[in-house]
Image: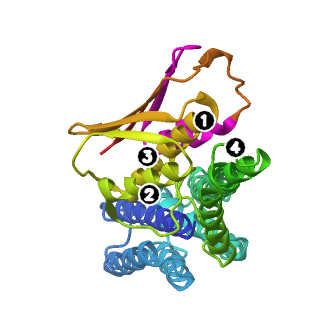
């Protein structure tokens, strides 16, 4: 915002300099024509105009009120000098030659005087002085003469343009601030929703799974496996309580012990051991190691573990197959079982287990999950993440 305000002031200063210098230059040419100004006075007028041009250059650089006042004083001095000697017959063309100086050469400072109301007094004084000096020039002068009215118009126009620019920029700044506040609120809402979804996934994949086993009296799982699983959940909750709250970079990405890159072959071992303890025999197919970024690795392993958990709980079998393959740009895992199967179209969309813990988790790292199942014919789930 400060930069925009600075550019606004710089624009008004540049406009005042360009408008004023053009008026001074044009007035200098007109006053140099034969018969307009007394030849003895003309050098002094030119010198004052050069000084005024220098003051206008400084107005364009800093916009300080002192340079603005100096521009007005030198401009009015040139208007007065051009009419010397006072009381003698002057050229009819003198007011016309002085009008560019009064309207633009001096009136150009109206751009910077519009910056705030405290400077309007200087604008009023400069307008009155330059209009009266132009009106007094020539034998047929007057406050309602065309040169005098033109001078007044130049001052008024520069003030109006300056005010228009100032008001327009202030209005734009208010709109930008409003957009910024709306964006901030939307981002906060998105982050809150991401944390809520991430917390739901974390609880679904760990504590709720263990509590479900306990609610069913650990059917199919021995006591030692339940104890070890509960111990792992307790360690996770302890870390969260001590301040290691996972803060998602985006929805579904968390890691209590983040690493830059981890070999997939070493981290699969924890998944194998977990389901071996839980009574599900998993036959693993595929060899070699694959390096994945930590966020992609976390999403892949947690989604794979959730698929195996679904097999253990719902398929009605104690065996499953996991085939891991890789290409130049992707890693895939195919989880298959010969269980009871189900109709994917009949699954209640309000059930968030597979939707959040598998599909949404992989989607957050640009991956995907596809499920194929038929009642009585088993289930196949294909997980894919980028390498």
Looking at the image, tell me whether mark 3 or mark 1 is earlier in sequence order: 3
Vertical arrangement, residue 82 with respect to residue 356, above or below: below
Residue 198 lies, in percent from the top left, at 63, 52
The CA span between labels 4 and 2 is 22 Å
Q: Considering the numbered disc 2 on the image, is that residue within a helix, a strand or a loop?
A: helix
Question: What residue is pinned by disc 2?
Answer: 270
Q: Which mark is residue 300?
A: 3
From the viewer's perspective, is the residue at label 2 or at label 3 nearer? 2
The label nearer to you, 3 versus 4, is 4
Q: How far apart in space, not on screen, are marks 2 and 3 (Cα)?
A: 13 Å
297 relative to 119, above or below: above
| For residue 72, above or below residue 195 | below
Residue 336, percent from left and from top: 44, 28
- Colour pattern: rainbow
The residue that mark 4 highlights is: 219
Label 1: few (<14), some or many (≥20) within 10 Å?
some
In the rendered image, the quadrant that contains the N terminus is bottom right
Q: Which residue is mark 1?
A: 354
Task: Give residue 186's position: percent from left, percent from top.
Answer: 68, 50
- Counting from the top left corner in percent of width and height, residue 299 is at 47, 49
């Amino acid at each position: 915002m400060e930069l925009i305000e600075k550019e606004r002031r710089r624009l008004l200063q540049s406009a005042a300099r360009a408008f004023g210098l053009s008026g001074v230059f044009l007035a200098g040419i007109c006053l140099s024509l034969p018969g307009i100004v007394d030849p003895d006075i003309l050098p002094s007028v030119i010198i004052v105009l050069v000084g005024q041009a220098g003051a206008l250059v400084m107005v364009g650089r800093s916009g300080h009120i002192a340079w603005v006042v100096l521009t007005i004083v030198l401009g009015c001095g040139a208007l007065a000098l051009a009419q010397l000697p006072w009381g003698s017959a002057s050229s009819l063309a003198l007011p016309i030659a002085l009008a560019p100086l009064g309207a633009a050469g001096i009136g150009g400072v109206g751009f910077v005087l519009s910056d705030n109301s405290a400077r309007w007094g200087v604008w009023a004084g400069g307008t009155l002085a330059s209009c009266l000096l132009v009106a007094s020039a020539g034998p047929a002068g007057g406050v309602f003469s065309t040169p005098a009215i033109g001078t007044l118009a130049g001052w008024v126009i520069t003030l109006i343009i300056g005010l228009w620019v100032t008001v327009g920029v202030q209005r734009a700044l208010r709109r930008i601030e409003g957009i910024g506040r709306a964006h901030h609120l939307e981002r906060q809402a998105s982050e809150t929703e991401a944390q809520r979804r991430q917390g739901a996934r974390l609880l679904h994949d760990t504590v709720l799974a263990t509590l479900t086993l306990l609610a069913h009296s650990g059917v199919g799982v021995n006591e030692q496996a339940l104890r070890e699983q509960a111990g792992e959940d307790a360690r996770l909750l302890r870390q969260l309580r001590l301040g290691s709250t996972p803060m998602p970079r985006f929805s579904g990405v968390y890691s209590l012990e983040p690493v830059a890159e981890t070999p997939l072959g070493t981290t699969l071992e924890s998944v194998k051991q977990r389901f071996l303890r839980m009574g599900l025999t998993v036959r693993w197919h595929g060899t070699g190691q694959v390096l994945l970024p930590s966020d992609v690795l976390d999403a892949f392993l947690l989604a794979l573990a959730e698929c195996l958990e679904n097999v253990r709980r719902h398929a009605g079998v104690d065996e499953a197959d996991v085939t891991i393959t890789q290409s130049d740009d992707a890693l895939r895992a195919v989880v298959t079982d010969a269980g009871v199967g189900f109709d994917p179209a009949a699954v209640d969309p309000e059930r968030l287990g597979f939707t959040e813990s598998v599909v949404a988790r992989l989607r957050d790292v640009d991956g995907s999950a596809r499920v194929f199942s038929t009642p009585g014919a088993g289930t196949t789930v294909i997980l894919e993440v980028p390498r």
